[in-house]
Image (cartoon, grey):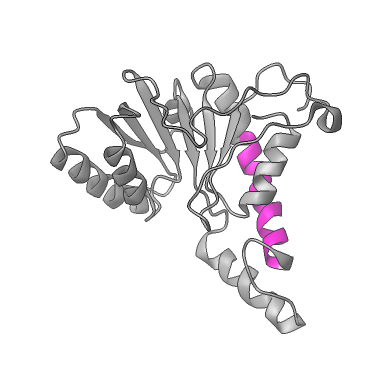
Amino acid sequence: PSGATTTASVFEAPPSTATSTGRAADPGSTGCSSVAPPVAGMGGDVTFRTVGVKVAIVGGGSTYTPELVEGLLDHRERLAVDELALLDPNVERLSPVAGLSERMLRRRGWEGKLVATADRAAAIDGADFVVVQLRVGGQTARLSDETLPLGHGCFGQETTGPGGLANALRTVPIVLELAEETARRAAEGAWLVDFTNPVGIVTQALLDECHR
């Protein structure tokens, strides 16, 4: 809710451009009490805390997770992660992805703690960064989003048009719920990093609810 006293920070990373942008909500239009400080690391070479960093990946069973793991390894001199939590309710997907991720991490000499879990509270608790990469409804819902509009002369895509709207209606409530839990359970000043499509609508919803 816009009147909440604790909010999560929002770090938008649109998959389509592979670039990251951060922005603060306008308190005049959203009712938020203050504007978030400038986003560190945007356009500069910024090193984050070098010890005690926990990253939670919501949707950790995704096949995109190994790419995220590789990125964390490639940039560990700037963001030294010593705990990585992979959260996914689908154990059949999570198990092989977690196994591959751990082999990648150990091969590169990472000595931190890797946790694969379906317990959302445990994964988010104390996290400095909560990465959200969900697909509510899975590939079945995506197929509908991208094919049904075509039969009505509309563009079929999961990020825009009728399919994007349907995706947003399924996804936004879940991401807002995750943001509220991040604000309650994660470390002070934790960032919510959004990779979830439709990324523009999801990020706007987060900002409208004063999650920054």
Would residue 60 be found to the left or right of residue 161 on screen? left
Would residue 97 be found to the left or right of residue 140 on screen? left
Residue 25 image point, x, y percent? 73, 32
- In the rendered image, the quadrant that contains the N terminus is top right
Magenta: main secondary structure = helix
Q: Residue at x 38, y 49 (%)?
A: 61
Q: Is residue 175 magenta?
A: yes
Residue 123 image point, x, y percent? 42, 30
Residue 121 image point, x, y percent? 48, 27
Farthest-out residue, front: 44
Q: Nearer the viewer, residue 129 or 142?
A: 129
Q: Is residue 204 above or below residue 166?
A: above
Q: Nearer the viewer, residue 88 or 6?
A: 6
Q: Please state the total of marks drawn on the protein image.
A: 0
Asked which quadrant contains residue 79, the reply is top left
Q: Is residue 63 above or below residue 31?
A: below
- In the rendered image, the quadrant that contains the C terminus is top right
Q: Residue at x 62, y 64 (%)?
A: 158
Q: Is residue 90 above or below residue 52?
A: below
Would residue 22 be found to the left or right of residue 93 on screen? right
Q: Residue at x 48, y 52 (%)?
A: 18
Residue 207 image point, x, y percent? 70, 35
Q: Is residue 118 above or below residue 34?
A: below
Would residue 108 be found to the left or right of residue 34 on screen? left
Q: Residue at x 69, y 49 (%)?
A: 201
- Please provide the residue range marked out in magenta: 163-177
Q: Is residue 68 magenta?
A: no
Asked which quadrant contains residue 126, the reply is top left
